[in-house]
Image: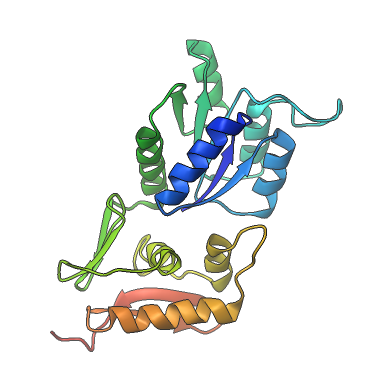
Amino acid sequence: MRILLVEDDPVLSDVMVKSLVQAGHRVDAARTLEQAAHYWRVQPYDAVLLDLNLPQNATPDSPVANGLTLLREVRARGDRTPVLVLTARNRTEERVAGLDAGADDYLGKPFELAEVEARLRALVRRTAGTDDRSEIGRLLLDRKARRVAIDEMPLDLPAREFEVLWELMTPPGRVVSKRALSDKLSDFSEVLGDNALEAFISRLRKKIAGSGARIRTLRGLGYALERDTEDAT
């Protein structure tokens, strides 16, 4: 997943980034609301972790006054990215305010990092309409275990190839554009070009050959993972 983390505590931010990256996600960390607003405008995300208690760190006339303002502005422009609000506030009215502003879930501090990841998976699963496990042919993706297998035999994939397959199987059969795949695999310091993306796709095709699934190129549209009707085994 490509995740935006909006958290001004440098220690907590670094710990969360490290944990999420080790779990195989790509994370952009914003320490101010204005930085978060910029990232959120220019980069699509699978999910956002938003601390409502960030200081403004903005000019007096900035429209980004607090986390609720940022969330309302994003929802007003039609962005439905799943948002998990993180806050030390425990008052019921403040939790309600966050949910009313467009948050999808709410987690009070302190929290366990394992719970953060579990809630993120649940939010993305709900939004995409998928389960933790997706299968096509004899190819299996287990999102919770971050495992790919063919006929129950584990298939070891490098991180970026795993991310490509994750995207193509969420859910299987949908067309994913080159731009969407590139956005998920890029960061602000490195943009993945078409040649690199095609190399990932080529390697994946070879690795899933004989699984009953294939990656189809739809010229001008992107890629789709579909059942391989020529594989009768």
Query: Closest to the observer: 26 or 102?
Result: 26
Image-quadrant location for residue 230: bottom left
- Residue at left 55%, top 51%? 45
- Residue at left 53%, top 45%? 81
**Residue 128 visible in the current orientation:** yes
Left or right placement of residue 183 versus residue 73 in this view? left
Image-quadrant location for residue 140: bottom left
Pinpoint residue 87: horizontal percent, then vertical percent. Answer: 53, 22
Query: Closest to the observer: 75 or 187?
Result: 187
Image-quadrant location for residue 135: bottom left
- Residue at left 19%, top 72%? 138
Vertical relation: 177 (above or below) 85: below
Vertical relation: 59 (above or below) 40: above
**Residue 140 visible in the current orientation:** no
Pinpoint residue 12: horizontal percent, then vertical percent. Answer: 53, 31
Pinpoint residue 121: horizontal percent, then vertical percent. Answer: 37, 45
Pinpoint residue 185: horizontal percent, then vertical percent. Answer: 53, 64
Left or right placement of residue 143 versus residue 154 in this view? right
Residue sticking out furthest to the bottom: 230
Left or right placement of residue 89 versus residue 153 in this view? right
- Residue at left 66%, top 44%? 77
Residue sticking out furthest to the left: 233
Left or right placement of residue 15 versus residue 76 in this view? left
Query: Closest to the observer: 224 or 197?
Result: 197
Vertical relation: 46 (above or below) 196: above
Please identify the quadrant where the C terminus is shown. Answer: bottom left
